Image (cartoon, grey):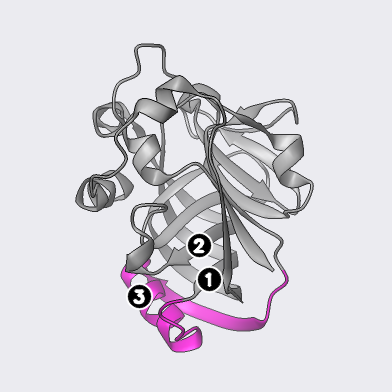
């Protein structure tokens, strides 16, 4: 099994927001995923093979499979471990637990957390128009929201630091509630009780835009990881 990555985090940071792969093509072999949508039109979350958009107001909409993505991390999820989590506060606590249950520091981890949360802090961004601003500038105007007393699913990935030019290093997570009403990019959370399922991957497939002049002339050699960390928080 492998994780499929569509474009790179450095490309997204530099304003490469034009979709180049349809949801139909990327879901064909993957059941979970996170990313964004053409023109950076909100957040993408794929749960059990169904794609959803989290719009600029952190509301959920099921997506047409013809929609294209400029950036997404996808996997065919078959959990290897299942752990009950109780009374957990924050992303740092989750990261600590993940390292205990998945100590392979240089492998790739996909995970799902389903349960009840007293709070999930999320954010999303509005659709962009050309000329595109860089992601750091876009997120200055992101919409942040706290979803209180909610039951739902976090879809996430954990990547080692050496992957920082391709994907956000560490934990990257999106949330969707069971009512398919609210969600977004996870900034933080307070968990009451949930089940963590995770799977380890040793293969990573990278797909980049083909015959795209904007992508081809973009300088992706610079280390953007410090800015990524600010944007992701």
The relative height of residue 16 versus residue 2 in the rendered view (above or below) is above
Separation (CA) of disc 1 from disc 3: 17 Å
Q: Give neighbour class at mark 1: few <14, some 14-19, many 20+ (Cα, 10 Å).
A: many
Left or right: where does residue 138 sit relative to residue 129?
A: left
Separation (CA) of disc 2 from disc 1: 6 Å
- Residues at discs 2 and 1 in contact (Cβ within 8 Å): yes
In the rendering, which numbered label is found on residue 93? 3
Front label number (1 vs 3) = 1
Front residue (pair 177, 22) = 22
Helix, strand or loop at label 1? It is: strand
Residue at image x 70%, y 36%? 23
Helix, strand or loop at label 3? It is: helix
**Residue 72 appears at what percent x and percent y?**
55, 44
Extent of the magenta region: 78-106
Left or right: where does residue 153 sit relative to residue 191?
A: right
Mark 2 sits on what residue?
A: 157
Mark 1 sits on what residue?
A: 109
């Amino acid at each position: 099994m492998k994780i499929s990555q569509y474009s790179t985090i450095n490309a997204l940071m530099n304003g490469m927001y034009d979709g180049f792969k349809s949801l139909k093509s990327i879901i064909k072999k993957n059941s979970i995923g996170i990313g964004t949508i053409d023109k950076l039109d909100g957040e993408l979350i794929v749960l059990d093979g169904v794609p959803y958009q989290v719009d600029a107001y952190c509301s959920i909409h099921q997506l047409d499979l013809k929609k294209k993505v400029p950036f997404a991390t996808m996997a065919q999820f078959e959990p290897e471990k299942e752990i009950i989590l109780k009374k957990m506060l924050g992303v740092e606590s989750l990261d600590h637990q993940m390292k205990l249950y998945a100590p392979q520091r240089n492998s790739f981890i996909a995970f799902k957390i389903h349960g009840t949360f007293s709070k999930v802090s999320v954010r999303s961004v509005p659709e962009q128009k050309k000329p595109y601003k860089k992601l750091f500038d876009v997120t200055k105007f992101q919409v942040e929201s706290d979803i209180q007393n909610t039951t739902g699913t976090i879809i996430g990935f954990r990547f080692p630091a050496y992957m920082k030019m391709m994907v956000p290093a560490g934990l990257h997570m999106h949330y969707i509630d069971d009512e398919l009403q609210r969600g977004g990019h996870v900034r933080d959370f307070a968990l009451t009780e949930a089940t963590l399922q995770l799977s380890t991957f040793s293969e990573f497939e990278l797909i980049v835009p083909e015959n795209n002049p904007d992508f081809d002339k973009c300088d992706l050699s610079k280390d953007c990881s410090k800015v990524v960390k600010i944007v992701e928080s």
